[in-house]
């Protein structure tokens, strides 16, 4: 090994370098494209289901919960006195969620849709739950990420104007933020539960399923007599939530962790009527789909955007550094900010 | 920014691609530093907003909440913690008309598939409206119920908000519901006054 290569290898192992690679090394935007499409559809459904209850929940003088906003909070509905504003914002959310889904003026659509969702949620804090907050968080990530480069109206329009070739790879910092928020969120949830005695004695799950005003499909009565199963499922919940933050960054474990998570939230969704919570979590999981796998999915409909070589060759791209902990030393072979997709021939601009 | 990116696209000539503003920023060291600081700040603030009561929470909880609200990233990861609530809840409004007849308003519910995506918000509202910390909404709720029933057989003279609650047991037969009238709106006397 020469002195030069030794120095390079040492540099690659520096914590700062790993950090940069994790957040800023360009990669395919396919995972966030999947997030964008599903979130757009879900946000449109969210708006559609809110429309019938805009009055009384968000119209002045009825069931709108008015109180002084906490420090730091801002709510555009407080700035306008027009009673029709909540309805207008909800309709605008419906439209911009759909345009985000199809990728028309993607960045603008996503920014407006996320702002509309924040506005509505802050308009009446009494009617929204943690799933709504996750929906909002995903929306912010979609607005921050370059999500319109693949499988979008914007991409089609760009090609019609003469932009050819695959879409450029981009820094994934907004996707990483969403991933970290979700992973840390699970850990915080486990931490909060660990302070409760019913999570220790294994009865928490049974207690939760007995809350009649939260029930969706009611488990059969015999299920509540299976104390051992209820204990095991309660502790499994704690284990899953506490373990997610570590295990999801391991390439080999990630598909299993996500698979278990999908089943976990399916169980929650079946028995507890908590709106968009599980669907929001599944949508956020899409940010964890490996770029190569997401590319394969997207390439079924957008071959040109993904690019032939990306679909057929894994050697072309560095393996995704799932985390600074397991990033391969040679992952940033092209140097930061220089991607196989960068440069003048690299396709089209972020819409 | 969309405008700048549009301009960048216009600038493409003879096979050259002008990088959009967002991509140019991503490649800038200063922007990467700024993003890194913001990411750490937001994540630390989110963690601090979920700390248990402690000296650290007393110091950092308030500023962390402010930061998280400014960036609109407030999260609620304390679902069913520290324990799931042990009670089931319900609410109804009892309406009395001037002619002595009565009616009942109940929190709307839908089917478990489809319309549940609308009515879960009413359930969340029910969970909160019954509690003393949402006392400010009780009168508004009673007035809204009275208004909803203004087309009844005669004018509404009274609306009572009634809480129902039951202490759940995991296994075996559930105890009966208990009820408590927690707010009364006397429409007739208020109108007279």
Image: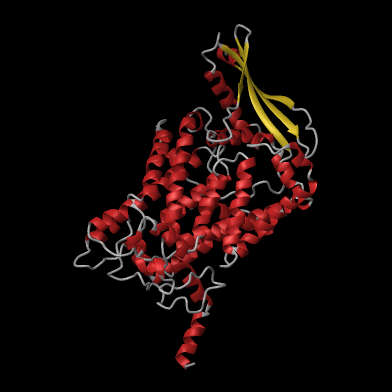
A134 or A125, nearer to the observer: A134
Which residue is at a point 70% across and 28% down the rendered structure image? B164
Rendered position, A248 above or below A20: above
Q: Position of residue B190 (x, y in %)?
A: 58, 16
**Picture coordinates of residue A310 (x, y %)?**
39, 67
When the figure is inspected, residue A6 is found, relative to residue B32, above or below; the finding is below
Residue A166 visible from this viewpoint: yes
Q: What's the residue at 29%, 54% (across, down)?
A: A156
Q: In which quarter of the image is residue A250?
A: bottom right
Hey, which residue is sitting farthest left in the picture?
A: B14
Residue A278: x %, y % from top left:
57, 47
Name the residue at 52% across, 19% down. Answer: B147
Q: Judge from the rendering whether residue B95 lies leftward or rightward of residue B174; answer left or right.
A: left
Asked if one can make out residue A198 in the rendered structure from this viewpoint, the answer is no
B167 sits to left or right of A131: right
Image quarter hosting the C terminus of chain A: bottom left
Total numbered badges shown on the rendered structure? 0
Tell me: residue A350, above or below residue A336. above
Say which quarter of the image contains residue A163. Answer: bottom left
């Amino acid at each position: 090994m020469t002195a030069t290569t030794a120095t390079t290898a040492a540099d690659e192992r520096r914590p700062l370098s790993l950090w940069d690679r994790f957040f800023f090394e360009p990669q395919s935007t396919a995972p966030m494209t999947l997030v964008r499409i599903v979130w757009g559809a879900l946000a449109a459904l969210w708006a559609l289901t809110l429309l019938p209850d805009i009055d009384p929940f968000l119209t002045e003088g009825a069931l709108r919960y008015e109180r002084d906003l906490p420090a730091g909070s801002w709510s555009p509905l407080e700035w306008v006195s027009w009673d029709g504003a909540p309805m207008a914002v909800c309709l605008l959310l419906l439209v911009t969620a759909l345009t985000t889904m199809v990728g028309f003026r993607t960045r603008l659509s996503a920014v407006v849709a996320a702002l509309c969702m924040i506005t509505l949620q802050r308009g009446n804090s009494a009617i929204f739950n943690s799933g709504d907050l996750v929906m909002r968080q995903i929306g912010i990530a979609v607005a921050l990420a370059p999500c319109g480069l693949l499988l979008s109206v914007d991409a089609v329009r760009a090609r019609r104007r003469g932009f050819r070739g695959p879409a450029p790879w981009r820094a994934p910092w907004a996707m990483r933020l969403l991933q970290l928020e979700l992973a840390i969120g699970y850990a915080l949830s486990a931490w909060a539960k660990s302070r409760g005695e019913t999570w220790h004695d294994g009865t928490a799950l049974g207690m939760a399923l007995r809350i009649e005003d939260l029930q969706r499909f009611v488990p059969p009565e015999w299920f509540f007599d299976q104390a051992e199963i209820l204990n095991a499922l309660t502790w499994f919940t704690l284990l899953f939530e506490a373990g997610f933050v570590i295990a999801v960054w391991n390439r080999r474990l990630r598909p299993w962790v996500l698979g278990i998570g999908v089943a976990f939230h399916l169980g929650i969704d079946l028995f507890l009527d908590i709106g968009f919570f599980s669907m929001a979590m599944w949508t956020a999981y899409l940010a964890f789909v490996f770029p190569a796998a997401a590319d394969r999915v997207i390439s079924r409909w957008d071959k040109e955007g993904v690019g032939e070589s990306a679909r057929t060759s894994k050697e072309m791209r560095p393996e995704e550094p799932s985390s600074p902990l397991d990033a391969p030393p040679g992952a940033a072979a092209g140097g930061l900010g220089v991607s196989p997709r960068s440069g003048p021939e690299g396709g089209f601009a972020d819409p | 920014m969309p405008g700048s990116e549009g301009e960048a696209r216009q600038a493409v000539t003879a096979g050259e691609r002008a990088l959009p503003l967002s991509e140019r920023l991503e490649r800038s060291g200063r922007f990467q530093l700024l993003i890194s600081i913001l990411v750490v700040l937001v994540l630390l603030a989110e963690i601090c907003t979920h700390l248990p009561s402690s000296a650290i929470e007393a110091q950092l909880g308030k500023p962390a909440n402010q930061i998280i609200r400014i960036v609109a990233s407030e999260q609620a990861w304390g679902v069913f913690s520290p324990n799931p609530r042990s009670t089931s809840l319900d609410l109804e409004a009892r309406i009395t008309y001037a002619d002595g007849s009565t009616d009942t308003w109940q929190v709307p519910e839908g089917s478990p598939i489809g319309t549940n995506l609308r009515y879960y918000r009413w359930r969340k509202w029910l969970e909160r409206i019954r509690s003393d910390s949402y006392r400010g909404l009780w009168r508004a709720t009673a007035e809204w119920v009275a208004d909803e029933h203004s087309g009844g057989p005669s004018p509404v003279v009274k609306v009572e908000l009634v809480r129902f609650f039951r202490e759940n047991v995991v296994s075996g037969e559930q105890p009966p519901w208990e009820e408590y009238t927690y707010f009364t709106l006397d429409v007739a006397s208020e109108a007279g006054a």
